[in-house]
Image: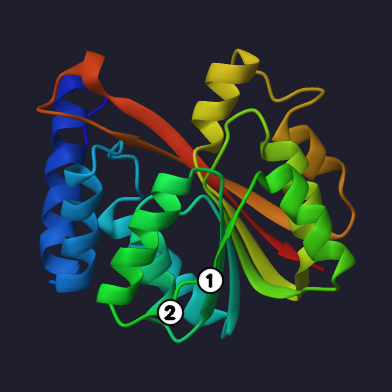
């Protein structure tokens, strides 16, 4: 791609490629469609992972042979269904009773028995550690500003060679830390940890090629050594 191409045109290409890839790579799934429509019907924010990202999570779970997954933030259960359809048992932590109820309903429609703990992850995670719970994979999709603390607990709850996936990391750094990756940020915390190997994958999504509508974000993926 020519470097002289306007940024708005590049974003338009990214948007078109992403839409085309979703159409080509993501097979229709009535249960996921139901989760989306149910989430909207109940007036909940449309902030679930995209179809491509949901498929990425499922692939990641399959790659490590995940049998147990801990999810922080259930919303309407979209990502929960993506992960559970790999055969993994998904335990979710959800602070909002309405979200818990809607997610539970959507999971049952998909033939999945809900395992959703209602509560603040800051209280639930230490309790899971005390109980000796260990998971193959931890997916964090909640509470910008708490990522670094959630990461510390996730490491304690993830088996060796298991993985931790934290969504919206770039947005959290921009929104909560002014774009810094220094002291107190997730990047600083992960970089100082000696028992994990991690990477950051930034991404940009556009809307109709308009620069002002470009959404910049990214996720962090880590394995426990």
Mark 2 and mark 1 residues within 8 Å of each other at the beta carbon? yes
Could you say where residue 132 lies in the image, as x and y percent from the top left? Answer: 85, 73
Quadrant assignment, res 176: top right
Residue at position x 39%, y 65% from top? Answer: 104
Whether residue 169 is visible: yes
Question: Is residue 214 shown left or right of residue 89?
Answer: left
Q: Looking at the figure, which quarter contains the N terminus?
A: top left
The crowding category of the residue bearing disc 1, from other C-alpha atoms within 10 Å (few below 14, some 14 to 19, many at least 20), is: some
Residue at position x 14%, y 49% from top? Answer: 19
The crowding category of the residue bearing disc 2, from other C-alpha atoms within 10 Å (few below 14, some 14 to 19, many at least 20), is: some
Q: Give the residue at mark 2.
A: 113
Could you say where residue 50 lies in the image, as x and y percent from the top left? Answer: 29, 51
The answer to whether residue 195 is above or below residue 3 is below
Could you say where residue 175 lies in the image, as x and y percent from the top left? Answer: 53, 18
Count every numbered label the image shows and give the total. 2
Secondary structure of the residue carrying numbered label 1: loop
Residue at position x 82%, y 23% from top? Answer: 183
Could you say where residue 80 lies in the image, as x and y percent from the top left? Answer: 42, 65
Quadrant assignment, res 41: top left
What's the CA distance linking mark 2 and mark 1?
7 Å
Q: Looking at the figure, which quarter contains the C terminus?
A: bottom right
Question: Is residue 138 shown left or right of residue 29?
Answer: right
Say which of 43 and 11 sits in front.
43
Kindly identify which numbered label has been placed on residue 128.
none
Say which of 106 and 145 sits in front.
106
The answer to whether residue 220 is above or below residue 131 is above
Q: Give the residue at mark 1.
A: 115
The answer to whether residue 165 is above or below residue 86 is above
The answer to whether residue 79 is above or below residue 87 is above
């Amino acid at each position: 791609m020519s470097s002289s191409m306007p940024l708005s045109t590049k974003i338009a290409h990214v948007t078109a490629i992403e839409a085309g890839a979703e159409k080509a790579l993501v097979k229709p799934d009535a249960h996921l469609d139901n989760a989306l429509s149910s989430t909207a019907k109940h007036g909940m924010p449309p902030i679930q992972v995209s179809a491509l990202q949901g498929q990425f999570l499922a692939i990641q779970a399959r790659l490590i042979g995940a049998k147990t997954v801990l999810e922080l933030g259930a919303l309407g259960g979209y990502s929960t269904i993506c992960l559970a359809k790999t055969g993994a048992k998904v335990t979710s932590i959800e602070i909002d009773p309405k979200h818990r109820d809607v997610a539970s309903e959507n999971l049952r429609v998909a033939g999945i028995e809900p395992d959703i703990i209602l509560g603040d992850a800051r209280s639930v995670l230490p309790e899971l550690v005390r109980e000796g719970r260990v998971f193959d994979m931890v997916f964090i999709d909640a509470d910008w500003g708490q990522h670094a603390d959630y990461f510390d607990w996730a490491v304690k709850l993830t088996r060796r060679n298991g993985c931790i996936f934290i969504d919206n990391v770039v947005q959290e750094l921009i929104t909560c830390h002014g774009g810094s990756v220094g002291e107190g940020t997730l990047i600083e915390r992960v970089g100082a940890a000696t028992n994990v190997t991690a990477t950051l994958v930034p991404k940009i999504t556009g809307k109709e090629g308009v620069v002002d509508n470009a959404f910049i974000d990214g996720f962090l993926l880590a394995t426990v050594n």
